[in-house]
Amino acid sequence: MSSLLNNELADLSVEQLMIPAEKVAHVQVGNPIEHALLVLIESGYSSVPVLDSEYRVQGMIGKTAILKSVTGLERFEMEKLADIKVEQVMETEKPRLTRGDNFLKGLKVVINHAFTCIVDEHGQFLGILTRRAILKEVNKVMYAAQ
Ligand code: 2BA
């Protein structure tokens, strides 16, 4: 398997496996979390990238963090959804990849993250690498080796 990985997969760049930005659902830092929740529910995804007005990646936001931010002692305080901004709730510590990074670097990242953002040298959003895209390539190579 290690020689297969070296030959077939290690040569791939994460850019070759990327879902391009125009196909990725995202929200902006200044949006109310009500908007983010609508995007998440309509798209069906559990979390999506957060961008600024210059299309630079600032973080990611998910349904759980949104619901946690409006959870009161006895009920969900849904009226807060319009007042809280995405930037107050988003996670900023997630790893990022650059387009030249190779498959193995992408593989390592998606062990702990369902997807990761790919950015250019200015931090501008190019797209995402998903766990699915990585697993698909591993599956291809494993089957070809049988
Ligand atoms: P999740 O939303 O937790 O989705 C986990 C997996 O469930 C996805 O894995 C995919 O296999 C499936 N899935 C969920 N919602 C889907 C939908 N609306 N259409 C098709 N398949 C769906 P991955 O494809 O590896 O995606 C990993 C994560 O990347 C997703 O986690 C989501 O957070 C993000 N993601 C994927 N595609 C996206 C897109 N076009 N826009 C925004 N975020 C995306």
Image (tube, rainbow, N blue to C red):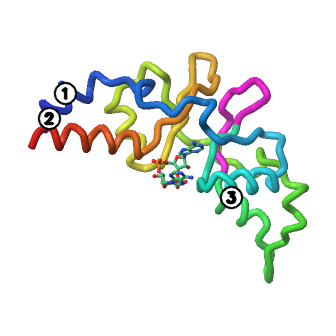
Rendering coords of residue 7 (x, y %) = 18, 25
The numbered dot on residue 41 is 3
Secondary structure at badge 3 equals helix
Residue beneath the point at 42% across and 31% down:
17
Q: How many C-alpha atoms fall within 10 Å of the one at disc 1: few (<14), some, or many (≥20)?
A: few
Residue holding disc 2: 2
Image quadrant assignment for residue 73: bottom right
Residue 6: mark: 1
Mark 3 and mark 2 in contact? Answer it, CB < 8 Å: no
Q: Amino acid at mark 1?
A: Asn
Q: Earlier in the sequence, mark 3 or mark 2?
A: 2
Q: Is residue 5 left or right of residue 63?
A: left
At 41% across and 25% down in the image, what residue appears? 16
Residue in view at x 61 percent, y 56 percent? 44
Vertical order, 60 against 23 (above or below): below
Rendered location of residue 112, percent (x, y)? 43, 50
Label 3, label 2: how far apart the Cα atoms are: 40 Å
Relative to residue 76, is residue 138 depicted above or below?
A: above
From the image, which quarter does the C terminus lie in?
Answer: top left
Amino acid under disc 3: Ile
* Separation of marks 1 and 2 at Cα, in angstroms: 6 Å
Tag 1 near tag 2, CB within 8 Å: yes
Q: Viewed as shown, does residue 96 lie left or right of 84?
A: left
Q: Taking 84 as reference, is 17 above or below it?
A: above
Relative image position of residue 140 (x, y in whole percent): 24, 39
Q: Which residues are magenta?
A: 51-61
Q: Is 23 placed left or right of 58 in the picture?
A: left
Quadrant (top left, top right, bottom left, bottom right) of the N terminus: top left
Q: Nearer the viewer, mark 1 or mark 3?
A: 3
| Left or right of 90 in this view: 108 | left
* Residue 107 location (% of width, % of height): 35, 39
